[in-house]
Amino acid sequence: MNLTFSQPIQKDIEPLIDIFYESFPKNYKLSKTVIKDVLELYIPAAGKHFLVAKNPKNEIAAFICGVKDMRKPLTQALKTLPKSLTFLTKPHSRFIIPPLFVQLFSGAHLVFGSTHSKYRKQGVFTEVMQKSISQLKKDNVKKIWFETLDGNQAIKRLAEKFGFKLIKQFPYENQTWSIYLLRL
């Protein structure tokens, strides 16, 4: 597939929200307002490590948000937490909060990513993930973390393909949360 890779621009926000929204399990739906706030927090924090893959018609096929240093978005979030994200400060939050904060600070974190439904099972996310890992490696990152819920078998297989190792699993709202690590 002929894809181009770039950082997201302002007009990409709405399509990113739609792709993000459609990809979450039905029992884990976030509102589009929350997703927008999350994207607006992470896009500047991730910088060049937030990648969108676009087709020749300039439509987003997939995206991934890699953050080299999680302290930046976490510090920013605590300073300027949008109203829609205030639930993050409550115990047992139902959001993608890196569960191993201390360890994540010592490496990069693939915070979230997804593929538009019409591009799934075509290797698009594999390309996006490869680009993200390559960029992080060029920036001398030694460890990359990510986590996923147990129902996402596709990302688990992809993680193994790239050499990520499962390092921890724990129960999370009637599911299993799995944490993976890639040492570069």
Image (cartoon, helix red, strand yellow):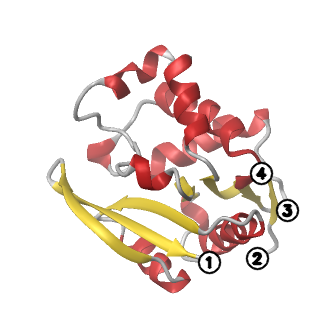
Give the CA separation, mark 3 to mark 1. 16 Å
Circle 1 or circle 4, nearest the eye? 4
The residue pinned by badge 3 equals: 56
The reply to whether dot 1 and dot 2 touch (C-beta < 8 Å) is yes
Give the CA separation, mark 3 to mark 2. 9 Å
**Dot placed on the residue nearer the N-terminal end, 3 or 2:** 2
Residue 18's spot in the image, x, y percent? 56, 42
Helix, strand or loop at label 1? It is: loop
Give the CA separation, mark 2 to mark 4. 22 Å
Observer-nearest residue: 103 or 36? 103
Q: Amino acid at mark 2?
A: Met
Circle 2 or circle 4, nearest the eye? 4
The residue pinned by badge 1 equals: 123
**Dot placed on the residue nearer the N-terminal end, 3 or 1:** 3
Give the CA separation, mark 1 to mark 2. 9 Å
Give the CA separation, mark 1 to mark 4. 22 Å
